[in-house]
Amino acid sequence: MSLKQQYEDYIARVRALGDAITNYECPDCGAVIETRAAPEGESWDTLSTCPHCEGLHMKFTDGSAAHAELLPA
């Protein structure tokens, strides 16, 4: 199964559960990526791979907001 298919399946499961979704822009290719929103008052940081370009980045999710940063070289 491709990374893009895994991502689409994950987002479909999150939606089916009724969990909140937010999005952010991939710092490598600029594609919009959907992700599960953190519960209000929580902050998450996650090493993530873009399902579009497969670039690696750090994702930061703070409640319903998310953004990503390139990894240091």
Image (cartoon, rainbow, N blue to C red):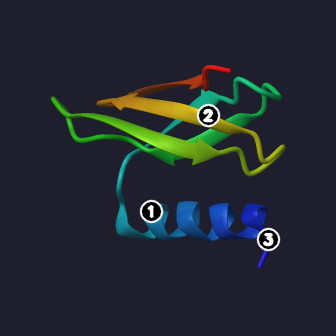
Answer with left or right where residue 26 lies relative to residue 31: left
- Residue type at tag 1: Val
Type of amino acid under label 2: His
Residue that mark 1 sits on:
14
- Residue tagged 2: 57
Instruction: Name which residue type carries label 3.
Output: Ser
Quarter of the image with the C terminus is top right
The residue under the point 75% across, 40% down is: 55
Residue 24 drawn at (x, y percent): 59, 29
Identity of the residue drawn at 78% across and 33% down: 31
Res 69 quadrant in image: top right
The reply, left or right, for residue 42 in relation to residue 31 is left
Q: Secondary structure at mark 1?
A: helix
Mark number, residue 2: 3
Q: Categorize mark 2 by other alpha carbons within 10 Å: few (<14), some (14-19), many (20+).
A: some
Marks 2 and 3, the one that precedes in the sequence = 3
Residue 73 vertical placement versus 37 (above, below): above
Whole-percent x, y for residue 57 in the image: 61, 34
Task: Report the mark closest to the observer, 2 or 3.
Answer: 2
| Mark 2 and mark 3: Cα distance apart in space | 19 Å
Task: Examine the rendered structure and indicate whether residue 28 appears above or below residue 19.
Answer: above
* Classed neighbour count for the residue bearing mark 1: other residues with Cα under 10 Å, few (<14), some (14–19), many (≥20): some
As drawn, the residue found furthest toward the left would be 41
